[in-house]
Amino acid sequence: MESKSVKETLLTRRSIRRFEREAITAEQLDLIYEAIRNTPTSYNGQQFTVIDIDDQELKEKLYEIIGQKQIKTCNRFMAFCIDYNRIRSFAKAEGVEMPGFCDTMDGVTVGIVDASLAMMSAVAAADSIGLGCCCIGYARTANPKAVAELLNLPDGVFVVCGLSLGVPREMPDMKPKMPASLLIHHNGYRQDDMLPELKAYDAEIRQYNATRSGATTDNDWLRHILSYYSEALGYKMLEAMRERGFDIRK
Ligand SMILES: Cc1cc2nc3c(=O)[nH]c(=O)nc-3n(C[C@H](O)[C@H](O)[C@H](O)COP(=O)(O)O)c2cc1C
């Protein structure tokens, strides 16, 4: 199995949303699993679980709930979840009291960070061997209850993000990202005016959207992102997490 260098893997990655029918091989999948397993996690508590879905019928049911065509056309769809069920069950079996950590913002943050890093491990591993993937945030927001039921998620398990994986059928242009000067500040948060760089980036994105290969749009960056934020005001995540057994109090 050939693999790209770390540099090439990280610097040429882009989201892939169209996939060949070809399956991911057992060897490729094994690398992705091993990369997921070796993810750094808070306290080495491994507060995450991945549901790996290759059953076509199940993928189609998920597509009906979540939308996002790539869920049914990818070779496998992985749901990266925060998981406090596993340790809670173990503690119960051992007769050890489980602190209410998952009912705190920090407990939830820890699980979300662990699940997110595990997803990035999978993304990097997949990309390094020529596979493609796309994170699917709608797996968390579209209908948390229906997704949890379909995947048999117990209390204390909540989908943080989905990942569609497969052999790429497209190689879209890479999306321009902000310059390092905007994203990485030295020795404290920048105090000078970021507006000129932000405007330049907005213009770069508008130009990219108007000229990229595939579907073009006249979207800029700022207004497009803010429209996502507005849409997200309708999500009831606190309620959804409470239903999943995260009684967040502090
Ligand atoms: C947490 C997260 C959720 C995302 N959700 C979706 C999604 O639901 N659908 C989708 O098509 N892309 C989704 N994406 C992909 C982003 O749109 C993509 O990463 C971004 O536009 C940058 O493009 P690039 O990955 O090609 O660099 C998501 C990415 C992340 C990190």
Image (cartoon, rainbow, N blue to C red):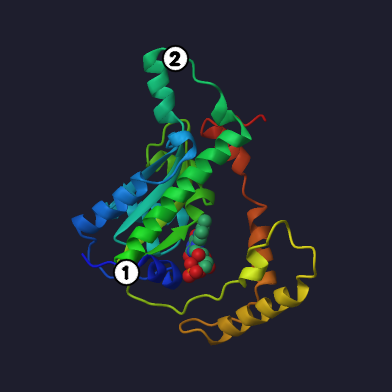
The three-letter amino acid code for the residue at tag 2 is Val
The image quarter containing residue 100 is top right
Q: Which mark is residue 96?
A: 2
Residue 73 shows in the view: no
- Is the shortest distance between ligand 1 and the CB of mark 1 under 8 Å? no
Q: Residue 98, relative to residue 77: is it above or below? A: above
- The quadrant of the picture occupied by the C terminus is top right
Q: Residues within 10 Å of mark 2 (few under 14, many from 20)?
A: few
Q: Residue at x 41, y 17 (%)?
A: 92
The image quarter containing residue 24 is bottom left
The image quarter containing residue 32 is bottom left
Q: Position of residue 108 (x, y in %)?
A: 56, 37
Q: Residue 115, relative to residue 108: is it above or below? A: below
The three-letter amino acid code for the residue at tag 1 is Lys
Q: Which mark is residue 4?
A: 1
Looking at the image, the residue that sits furthest to the front is 187
Q: Position of residue 117 (x, y in %)?
A: 46, 50
- Indicate which label's residue lies in the foreground, 1 or 2: 1
Q: Residue 234, relative to residue 155: is it above or below? A: below
Viewed as shown, does residue 45 lie left or right of 221?
left
Q: Residue at x 42, y 27 (%)?
A: 87
